[in-house]
Amino acid sequence: MRGNLPISRRSVFKLRQVAIGAIGSAKIKILILGCVALTILAVATRNRDGSLLMGWTGDVDGSSSPRGRYSIVMNTWKRYDLLKKSISHYASCPKLDSIHIVWSEPDPPSDSLKRYLNHVLRLNSRKDQQVELVFDINKEDSLNNRFKEIKDLKTDAVFSIDDDVIFPCSSVEFAFTVWQSAPYTMVGYVPRMHWMDQKKGNDKYKYGGWWSVWWTGTYSMVLSKAAFFHKKYLKLYTDEMPASIKEYITKSRNCEDIAMSFLVANATSSPPIWVKGKIFEIGSTGISSMGGHSERRTDCVNKFVDEFGGMALVPTSMKAIDSRNSWFCSQSSTGGVNSIPPNTLSLDLPEGSNILLPRHYCRH
Ligand SMILES: *[C@@H]1O[C@H](CO)[C@@H](O)[C@H](O)[C@H]1NC(C)=O
């Protein structure tokens, strides 16, 4: 026993020296491997339905109450293949109460379309939920239709969505739980921002698209092409939105989403909440909707500032992330780097040395 100890100590010492020699790469590799392994583990347990692990049945929040479920309000226009795809997808999402299709076409929906949609709804919806499908038919073709008050809506939460974007049910559910914790706030996946246009004076603004948000990490709107909000804002939009703004939207066929952002911000004096979620664009407008047309959007912002008597939008840089997916590979929220203290992995480093990891090195 006694004779063996120094030898093993020596070999440990040697190992350490080897380790220190290769420290730069080895430690980072170990960290990255660990990160990958834990991510795989996290994904695996989640896919097995992470809720079961905790004995969580999902009914604790009272999904029968008005706050426990949500309704989809979907805007569509002559794209029946997209409509069919997205309805059959969302039918399977838990806590969905009903789907309202905002119909502004001159002809009413055909019987075959109705039959098809009701069929996929029955086929794909979960056993424990009866999802109702309603066509809200409009005489006039206007973008304001998507925010018309729905009189018999059973849920407080409205999930407003375009027919050409699909979110996995897990992303929808996460955004819904964020909304439940802030029911008077708009909660969505597609952030936009406004800039002060200093060249034109202090009360002129510019619309900032996705790249502006990406660059600054700041946003002041979430677009209604994919957002949760309280149903009371439908009534507010219908009753209180200045007629001049509604006419402008009908004529320019644009900016109803910016107007809704103004309305909610004006009512709450608070910013919206951007939630992280996977987006699948199934329409063909994916790229063009990310850029371009920003002059028209800028005109809208300035018009709405005039009508609301000031800039109602409130900027923020907070983003909601599902911590079940990000607990290990966390991002630094303060500085540009994550600093891992020495000895994290029981390896000796010269005093004071840190391993600096670039921000977002575990990207989600
Ligand atoms: C904006 O908010 C103010 C104060 O709450 C309210 O009086 C006004 O009607 C709101 N404007 C619109 C267009 O909703």
Image (cartoon, rainbow, N blue to C red):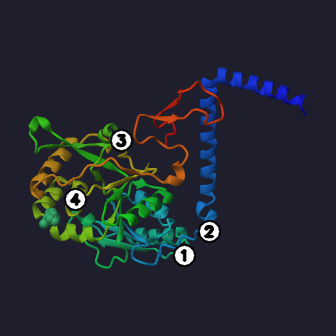
User: Counting residues from the N terminus, which is met first, the one under dot 1 or under dot 2?
Assistant: 2
| Residue 184 position within the rendered picture, expressed as x and y whole percent measured from the top left | 30, 65
Q: Which mark is residue 269?
A: 4
> Of marks 2 and 4, which one's residue comes earlier in the chain?
2
Mark 1 to mark 2 CA distance (whole Å): 18 Å
Q: How far across and down, in percent of the image, does residue 77 sit? A: 31, 59
The quarter of the rendered structure image containing the N terminus is: top right
Label 2 CA crowd tier, 10 Å (few <14, some 14–19, many 20+)? few
Query: What residue would you read off at disc 2?
Result: 55
User: Residue farthest to the front?
Assistant: 2
Q: Quadrant of ligand 1?
A: bottom left
The amino acid on which the numbered mark 4 sits, given as a three-letter code, is Ser
Amino acid type assigned to the residue bearing label 1 in the image = Asp
Image vertical order of residue 124 relative to residue 308, above or below: below
Which numbered disc flags the more N-terminal residue, 3 or 1?
Answer: 1
Relative to residue 45, is residue 250 drawn left or right?
Answer: left
Q: Nearer the viewer, residue 193 or 19?
A: 19
Give the amino acid at mark 3: Ile
Three-letter code for the amino acid on which mark 2 is drawn? Gly
Closer to the camera: disc 2 or disc 3?
2
Instruction: Name the one closer to the observer, 234 or 138.
Output: 234
For residue 128, the mark is: 1
Q: Please report the residue visible at 12 percent of the width from the left and 63 percent of the height from the top.
A: 242
Q: Mark 4 or 3 closer to N-term?
A: 4
* Residue at figure coordinates x 41%, y 57% from the top left: 82
Of discs 4 and 3, which sits in the foreground? Answer: 4
Q: Residue at x 28, y 52 (%)?
A: 221
Q: Is mark 2 within 8 Å of ligand 1?
A: no
Q: CA distance from mark 2 to mark 4?
A: 39 Å
In the rendered structure, find residue 287 and report the number of the disc placed on it. Answer: 3
Compared across the picture, whether 136 is left or right of 320 comes to left
Q: Give me the disc on residue 102.
A: none
